[in-house]
Image (spheres, rainbow, N blue to C red):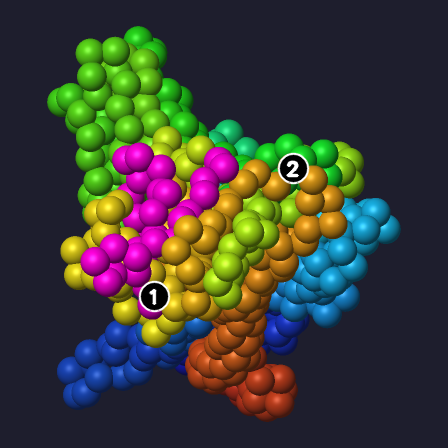
Amino acid sequence: MSSLLAIGKTGLFAAQAALSTTGHNITNANVAGFSRQGVVQATSVALDTGVGFLGTGTQIAQIKRYSDDFLNNQVRTAQASTSGLESYYSQIKQIDNLLADTTSGLSPAMQDFFSGVQDMAANGASVPSRQAMLSSSETLATRFQALDARLGEIRSGVNAQIETSVTAINTYATQIAKLNEQIGNFATTAQRAPNDLLDQRDQLVLELNKYVKASVRPGDNNSLTVSIGSGQPLVVGQDAFQLAAVPSPTDLSRVEVGYQTGNKVTILPDGALTGGELGGVLEFRTGTLDTAQSALGKVAIGLAFEFNRQHELGVDQNGQPGKKFFEEAQAFVGKSINSSPLSESSLKAKVVDPSKLTDNDFEVRYKEGTYSVMRLSDGKEMASVKPDADGVASVTYGGVEFNFKGAPRDGDNFVVRPTLNGAADFKVLANDVSQIAAGAPIATSVNLKNTGTGKISEGVVDKNFLGAGATTLPVTLIYKKENGNALITGFPDGAIVTGIDSTGEPLNEGDPIPLDRVKFVDGATYSFGGVSVTLTGAPNTGDEFTIADNKGGIGDTRNIAALGQLQTKNIFNNGTATLQSSYAQMVSTVGNKTREVQVNAAAGNALLQQSQNAALDVSGVNLDEEATNLIKYQQAYQAASKVMQIAGTIFDSLLSIGR
């Protein structure tokens, strides 16, 4: 009798537990991270009666949590990848819209600037054309600065997002560690683990992957060990480690991510943390923001450098040699705050040849008496130099000149970004229209007493005209015949003369030409001391051709015309890219990357949805199924109650017999 009553009681308890679990599933169906639970029953130990084993009812073996670790890991991986791509896309589309804008982008301002230069050349360098050209120059400078300022705002937003992400990661790490402790206190075996706490922990790990890709593996006592980056532990058992958002040692305006151990913070490379919002924004800063800002600066520095060099070869409205028209930005140089406090070393860097720029940033280290210039992207040494006793040294690589001074110490470290400040520091130095060097510095003439038909071109000058070997003007070239040879004399003593004929062939194989053997060839161009002139026609002996200073050439526009030609001059990439093509390449690169990230983000979202659906097929709550279970367990409850009722009736009958 008591056996039948006990059997009914176990069935009643089992059905009651199943009903409670089903109700728990139903009420938590919309809770994020909740996994469906089910009661697993087992047969109680049977009673040996001597003639066979008599069943004693049922027992609850486990409240099972339906969850698949493999599928959950797939969801976490897809979540980290998708969040990273979405974070990257939300940032890069700002730059894409900024650079490609046909109204506020750089291309319209640059086109207007060169149109102003060419209009000035076409209008005899009149005062109105000079004023228009100066105004378009200011507009161009303002556009460069505005674009750079907008990129600076995006950089500040990146810093803020890094700090926010680090705070969130630290919060999740602390919460996961606390749940590890609680689960460890409750769970003696995996079968008796607190299911709801496991769900909460898994959900926290999933949320963590929205900020950074986290690897998970089981630890002791039902805990989880969570690591990030290249294996840095974030949660180990009940201990949570912390990240820190700290200023870069070489650039205090740049926020880096550090890994904190005790009181020490070790800065992690940007590429060490991948996935999630943090990984995405770090990849964006390194892969797009830095390169876009440097590429914009490269265009600004290249324009300023080439324009200034040509402008200095002209004369202004007052007959004075041209000066620098635009400011040429210094390279960004940051000395690490971790350098020796006894160090007195300093570094200045500047672009000296835009055509040789490699689009790389550099790290400079001093060790054992040598400065090493290394490519920042991969740490490969590109150049080195030993300073003298006073710490002075200079080395040039990739179009950038590095100048050191002051006593260095081992461990001194610098970061050099050659063109990062190019657009921000781009400005017009000329403040008056009279300072525009529109004219050429030389003027040529033919002696009115000449008897031949020889002519001399207007002449052009190059950078050597301003160098140590520059020609002292005036110079008078004289035609003569000697032993049947037509010669040109009158070149300055010590001058190095070269010449090419009208087809571009050298006048003699042994350039430079001896001063007493410079042959006259109709249409040949002669160069010396930075001056080049072309002689044509048929001069007679004694005919003279004079090259003098151009002091009164107010209406001369030869130099401003040469400045206008810079629009189509190949300045970058070893003389293969113009200003416009270099900027267009930058816009194209950003646009292509934007599209790539957008497509990958869409694909990532689809993959994430598939992974979530697969995981939900195992752990998700189906309300129709649970409603069916309610009816099933209700009937089981009623049936178990009926067993107990029958046992009670039989017991009452036995008692009545005894009366």
Give the magenta-colored segment's residue range. Answer: 473-501
Q: Where residue 67 appears, x then y in whole percent?
A: 41, 73
In the rendered structure, find residue 81 and report the number of the disc placed on it: none
In the picture as drawn, the residue positioned furthest to the right comes out as: 128
Judged from the image, the secondary structure of the residue bearing numbered disc 1 is loop
Please identify the quarter of the rendering in which residue 433 is found.
top right
Residue 412 sits in which quadrant? top left
Q: Residue at position x 28%, y 35% from top?
A: 494
Identify the residue shown where x is 50% and y is 45%.
547
Q: Is residue 80 left or right of residue 23?
A: left
Question: In whole angstroms, how far apart are the C-alphas of marks 2 and 1?
Answer: 30 Å
Q: Is residue 500 visible?
A: yes
Q: Is residue 153 left or right of residue 278?
A: right
Where does residue 314 sit, x and y in percent of width and height? 59, 43
Residue at the spot of label 2: 551
Whether residue 171 is visible: no
Which residue corresponds to mark 1? 521
Residue type at mark 1 is Val
Amino acid bearing label 2: Lys
Q: How many marks?
A: 2
Does 476 appear in magenta? yes
In front of the other: 381 or 471:
471
Mark 2, secondary structure of its residue: loop
